[in-house]
Amino acid sequence: MNQHPIIIKDSSLVRIKAEKACNCACSDLTVIESFPASHFEFSKLEVKLNPELHSMNLDGSNRVVYVTTSDCGTNSIVVMNDAAWNILIAFLRSEQNEIETDFHHWCRQWSEPVVTDFLARLVEMRFLYPSPRVHSSIVEQRDVLESWLHITDRCNLRCKYCFLPHLPVDMSIDTGLASIDSIFRSALAHEYHKIKIKYAGGEPLLRFPLILKLHEHTKRLGEFYNIEYDGIILSNGTLLTEEIIRNIRLHHLGLMVSLDG
Ligand code: SF4
């Protein structure tokens, strides 16, 4: 019998649990705590190979495989044998029926539990991405509508890697209020119980008075419609003063300081 697909060395899965309090830039949609094999119904599974996947041949039969992007602190770097690699790259083919044929072939070769466990691990390590249809069966139903408001394009810093053009462009109060009204319309239409708004930039603390106005407006609407609300400022932290911190506390805003842009 051919050798089973094996992950020989797994120095990966540096997993920072995506807690509710996590307000990083990753979308909640990417959060998969685990992907137990019991959820693995291949006939319903549509998966895609992570486009950021890379590999390096080690000694002809083993490979280092890794992804260059991460979701919520999860990275995967592993060494796998040839059988494992051949299963993984089969997903380069996009046709579902071809994968299904392969799947039955693998199951005959190594048994179904071995193959499903291995595929589940590939999903956990973000090497494979299940389709939204599969996500919905394994990810807790989300009831939080999360939105970002780009308060300003301006910033007091000039990080080399910053993707913003730093134009002197600010969000107007009218645009901000209209955006929040629109977020509530969506929340009501889709029966969300909670809204989370991230006030971002540029450096949003350059427009702190605007944030406070938008925050108060959102709180009022939340109370009126009985929709919970969390407001979070995403800042580089360099403009924080005692007065701003006092106000952030007073108005029950959240603050997330990013050290790397
Ligand atoms: S702090 Fe953020 S917005 Fe400002 S320059 Fe750096 S990366 Fe860009």
Image: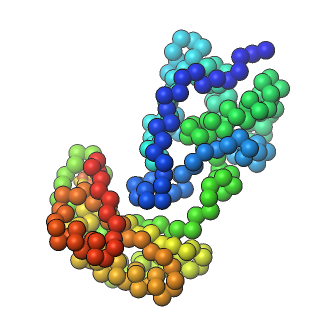
Residue 60 placed where, x, y %? 57, 12
Height in image: 9 above or below 175?
Answer: above
Height in image: 70 above or below 240?
Answer: above
Residue 184 placed where, x, y %? 49, 79
Q: Nearer the viewer, residue 170 or 29?
A: 29
Q: Nearer the viewer, residue 179 or 79?
A: 79
Height in image: 54 above or below 209?
Answer: above
Height in image: 64 above or below 202?
Answer: above
Furthest residue toward bottom: 224
Q: Residue at x 57, y 48 (%)?
A: 33
Q: Residue at x 57, y 73 (%)?
A: 192
Q: Quadrant of residue 62?
A: top right
Q: Quadrant of residue 142?
A: bottom right
Residue 212 placed where, x, y %? 29, 77
Q: Report if residue 180 is visible in the image.
A: yes
Q: Residue at x 17, y 71 (%)?
A: 243
Q: Quadrant of ligand 1?
A: bottom left
Give the position of the N terminus as an image quadrant.
top right
Q: Report if residue 149 is visible in the image.
A: no
Q: Residue at x 83, y 26 (%)?
A: 108
Residue 220 placed where, x, y %? 41, 86
Residue 247 located left or right of residue 101: left
